[in-house]
Image (cartoon, rainbow, N blue to C red):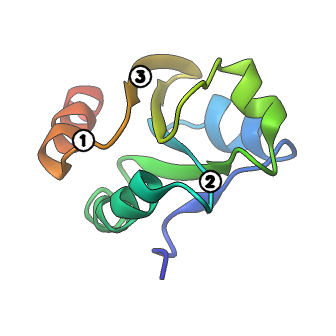
Amino acid sequence: MSSPQIVTLTQDNFDAEVLKSAAPVLVDFWAEWCGPCKMIAPVLDELADEYAGKVKIGKVNIDEHQGIAAQYSVRAIPTLLLFSKGQVTEQMVGLRSKRDLKASFDRVTA
């Protein structure tokens, strides 16, 4: 079960939810068939709750929204892009620990 804090991102809402967001946004590019994506999902759920109001977390299903994945040159999943003020400030490819993700969040919220 996904945290209610996590936003499902689409071509229609990506601009408003990510690029125009006042808060930093972590975008998780994932797919239903991706094992590591399923493994990182509970970590993102926990972080979404812990950082509610400080960092927004959104998910892009690459099978449904290939245009967004292509726009950001996503070639492997999971790919996590951290946006601040509409710009990508960090890119992480593959499974990441909760500690690593918290360190990234703490850098953009400091």
Which residue is disc 1 drawn over?
101
Which residue is disc 3 drawn over?
91
- List x then y, in percent, for residue 83: 49, 27
Task: State the CA–CA distance, disc 1 to disc 3.
Answer: 11 Å
Amino acid on which the number 1 mark rests in the picture: Leu
Question: Where 64 falls versus 84 (above or below)?
Answer: below
Q: Residue 26 versus residue 72: which sits nearer the camera? A: 72
Q: Secondary structure at mark 2?
A: loop
Question: Where 47 falls versus 80 (above or below)?
Answer: below
Q: Quadrant of the C terminus?
A: top left
Which residue is disc 2 drawn over?
31
Question: Where 92 falls versus 66 (above or below)?
Answer: above
Task: State the CA–CA distance, disc 2 to disc 3.
Answer: 18 Å
Q: Residue at x 26, y 42 (%)?
A: 96
Q: Earlier in the sequence, mark 2 or mark 3?
A: 2
Q: Residue 23 versus residue 40: which sits nearer the camera? A: 40
Q: Residue at x 30, y 56 (%)?
A: 51
Quadrant in which residue 32 is drawn: bottom right
Mark 2 Cα shell of 10 Å, populated few (<14), some (14-19), many (≥20): some
**Mark whose residue sits in front, 2 or 1:** 2
Disc count in the image?
A: 3
Q: Residue at x 74, y 20 (%)?
A: 71
Q: Secondary structure at mark 1?
A: helix
- List x then y, in percent, for residue 78: 47, 42
Quadrant in which residue 46 is drawn: bottom left
Mark 1 Cα shell of 10 Å, populated few (<14), some (14-19), many (≥20): some
Would residue 57 appear left or right of 55 to someone viewing this image?
right
Task: State the CA–CA distance, disc 2 to disc 1.
Answer: 20 Å
Amino acid on which the number 2 mark rests in the picture: Ala
Q: Is residue 52 visible?
A: no
